[in-house]
Image: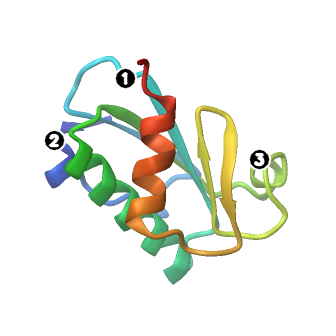
Amino acid sequence: MRSLPPSRAAPLDGGQSRREIITRGRLSIVEIKILGPGCPRCRAVEKVTFDALAELGVDATVTKVTEIDEITQYVMVTPGLVINEKVRCSGRVPNKEEIKKWIQEELPA
């Protein structure tokens, strides 16, 4: 596990079935799961998610989930995006503004 600022967060790769990156090295209140086998659309969700986190300056634990058994616990169509155990998107690449809105909804008031 590596700690990096969101703007320099390393992309998740297919080297492991699950790999976590804690952005900016602090305890996070937002847990994000990117669901998918590693296709181009899954990587696009990953990039847009890290861009949204960087713009918001929010600390988050981001996990890339590639195991089919775990993916299907959340969605049947990839890519999928789960924020704090809530499925926010399935089968498409959300735009950065959508992801920012979903993250902000999870932040304490």
Disc 3 marks a residue whose amino acid type is Glu
The answer to which of marks 1 and 2 sits earlier in the sequence is 2
In the rendered structure, find residue 70 and report the number of the disc placed on it.
3
Q: Determine the CA span between mark 1 and mark 2.
A: 13 Å
In the rendered structure, find residue 5 and report the number of the disc placed on it.
2
Q: Residue furthest bottom?
A: 40
Q: Nearer the viewer, mark 2 or mark 3?
A: 2
* Badge 3: residue crowd in 10 Å (few <14, some 14–19, many ≥20): few
Q: Could you tell me if residue 13 is visible in this image?
A: no
Q: Determine the CA span between mark 2 and mark 3.
A: 28 Å
In-front residue for pair 8/104: 104
In the rendered structure, find residue 28 and report the number of the disc placed on it.
1
Kindly check if marks 1 and 2 are in contact, taking CB atoms under 8 A apart as contact. no
Disc 2 marks a residue whose amino acid type is Pro
Residue 10, quarter of the rendered image: bottom left
Q: Secondary structure at mark 3?
A: helix
